Image (spheres, rainbow, N blue to C red):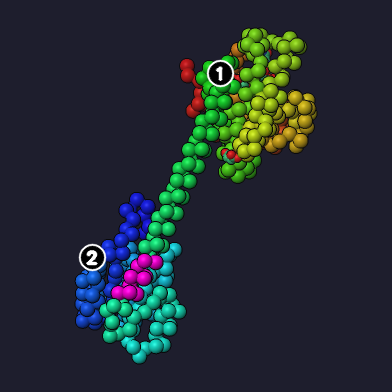
């Protein structure tokens, strides 16, 4: 009902007032008092069953509600109005006969804001109408400003989120730029990682984070000289020692940030070359000492590296790569993750094909 795009009315004279009374003479009188005073948006009904639809359709600012009506009395109408799943209680001014003291009290207890007694005293009626409309206008203004603020916060949050994702993707591309031309490896590897993450029962937020953090796993390759990184053949032992520093370099680059995303990216960069049996680098961690996301990325990374062309190797077939992964279960890789990998092979191969290198 409070649609933020709608222009906010703060002029009480233009606010929508709904008159509800089963007696035509009362309706006419009230309407006349109000319109002569300058209220320009007055609607009337003698049918109490129409109050809820009219109120909703016109988004009324005030309801002048007769209590004593046949079929559905004012209390019945109020009960219907109170049931609307609308955060603002409807602004109701009840109209009761002078001798109906008990009605007035009950009406106030049931959500009426105020009352006037019949026969109407025009100036009293107008004062009460004016007071209630002032409150309603203030209320609408607050609601409107809250909605605007919330929208602004949402927009800003989205911009921050988008910017962060873009920066993170640029970092990932920078990591791949020198030894992989298309950037498709990180896309495949990240998607396979997120898929394995889901299979390993990470929740949606965590697997989404994994999708965004995994592209930075090799950011440390920035610190490896060309003649090593791009070497067409096998490394000397000295070159290998230098190459292995890319895990720690990546962790250093990503260290010192406090967002969940950057913390995960750091953990992945540091541990994606650790092995389940403890023979990996840089720290020789073993089994579950290696963070789950590191174990996941290790598997996704090797599978995609094996099936890809590198400066130092040709692409392996999927079959040969799967055989290596099976033989490394419990050695290089977490055996539970290898099981999940094999169970999810069709989806993994689909990712390979969808993001395959152009011919
Ligand atoms: P990368 O090319 O992205 O490979 C990632 C990981 O996939 C490797 O980590 C390794 O575990 C696996 N892998 C890739 N190709 C093969 C392969 O032909 N056989 C086997 N068994 N496993 C393979 P690793 O070994 O820690 O290497 C890390 C990075 O070091 C590699 O990333 C690559 O950039 C570089 N690298 C490794 N060996 C060589 C090499 O002989 N020559 C050159 N130029 N670079 C190498
Ligand atoms: C690449 O540099 O082509 C990918 C290396 C990796 O992700 O391990
Ligand atoms: C995310 O991990 O994608 C958002 C949460 C955060 O920045 O820490
Ligand atoms: Fe690496
Ligand atoms: Fe990789």
Give the residue at x 62% y 19%: 222
Q: Is residue 141 above or below residue 178?
A: below
Give the residue at x 58% y 43%: 205
Q: Position of 2 compared to 163: left or right?
A: left
Q: Quadrant of residue 90?
A: bottom left
Where is residue 214 drawn, in percent x and y?
Answer: 60, 31
Q: What's drawn in magenta, residue-wise?
A: 126-135
Where is residue 16 drawn, in percent x and y?
Answer: 29, 65
Residue 48 visible in image? no
Q: Nearer the viewer, mark 1 or mark 2?
A: 2
Q: Is residue 156 above or below residue 222?
A: below
- Is ligand 3 within 8 Å of the beta carbon of the residue shown at mark 2? no
Name the residue nearer the viewer: 141 or 64.
Answer: 141
Are there few (<14), some (14-19), or many (20+) residues within 10 Å of tag 1? Answer: some
Give the residue at x 72% y 12%: 239
Which residue lies under the disc numbered 2?
A: 40
Name the residue nearer the viewer: 278 or 83.
Answer: 83
Which residue lies under the disc numbered 1?
A: 177
Q: Total label count?
A: 2
- Is residue 288 located in the magenta-colored stretch of the structure? no
Q: Position of 68 compared to 153: left or right?
A: left
Residue 229 visible in image? yes
SS category of the residue bearing label 1: loop
Q: Is residue 196 above or below residue 141?
A: above
Are there few (<14), some (14-19), or many (20+) residues within 10 Å of tag 2? Answer: some
Where is residue 331 drawn, in percent x and y?
Answer: 75, 28
Give the residue at x 43% y 75%: 111
Question: Which is the main secondary structure of the residues drawn in magenta?
Answer: helix
Q: Is residue 325 above or below residue 21?
A: above
Where is residue 254 drawn, in percent x and y?
Answer: 65, 29
Q: Quadrant of residue 75?
A: bottom left
- Is ligand 2 within 8 Å of the beta carbon of the residue shown at mark 1? no
């Amino acid at each position: 009902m409070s649609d933020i795009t709608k222009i906010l009315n703060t002029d009480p004279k233009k606010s929508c007032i709904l008159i509800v009374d089963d007696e035509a003479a009362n309706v006419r009188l009230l309407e006349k008092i109000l319109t002569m005073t300058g209220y320009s948006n007055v609607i009337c009904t003698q049918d109490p069953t129409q109050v809820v639809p009219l109120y909703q359709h016109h988004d009324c600012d005030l309801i002048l509600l007769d209590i004593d009506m046949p079929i559905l009395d004012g209390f019945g109408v109020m009960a219907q109005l109170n049931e609307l799943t609308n955060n603002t209680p409807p602004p109701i001014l009840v109209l009761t006969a002078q001798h109906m003291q008990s009605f007035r009290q009950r009406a106030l207890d049931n959500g009426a804001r105020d009352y006037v007694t019949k026969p109407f005293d025009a100036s009293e009626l107008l004062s009460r109408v004016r007071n209630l409309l002032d409150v309603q206008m203030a209320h609408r203004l607050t609601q409107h400003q809250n909605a605007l603020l919330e929208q602004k916060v949402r927009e800003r949050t989205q911009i921050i989120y988008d910017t962060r994702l873009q920066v993170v993707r640029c970092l990932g591309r920078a990591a791949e730029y020198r030894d992989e031309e298309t950037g498709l490896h990180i896309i495949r590897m990240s998607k396979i990682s997120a898929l394995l993450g889901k299979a390993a029962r990470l929740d949606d937020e965590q697997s989404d984070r994994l999708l965004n953090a995994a592209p930075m796993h090799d950011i440390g390759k920035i610190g490896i000289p060309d003649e090593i990184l791009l070497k067409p053949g096998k490394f000397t032992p000295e070159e290998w020692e230098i190459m292995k520093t890319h895990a720690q370099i990546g962790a250093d680059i990503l260290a010192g940030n406090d967002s969940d995303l950057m913390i995960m990216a750091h953990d992945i960069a540091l541990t994606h070359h650790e092995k389940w049996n403890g023979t990996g680098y840089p720290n020789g961690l073993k089994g579950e000492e290696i963070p789950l996301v590191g174990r996941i990325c290790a598997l996704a990374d090797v599978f995609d590296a094996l099936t890809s062309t590198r400066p130092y190797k040709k692409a392996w077939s999927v079959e040969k790569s799967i055989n290596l992964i099976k033989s490394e279960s419990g050695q290089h890789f977490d055996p539970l993750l290898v099981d999940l990998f094999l169970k999810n092979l069709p989806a993994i191969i689909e990712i390979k094909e969808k993001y395959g290198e152009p011919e």
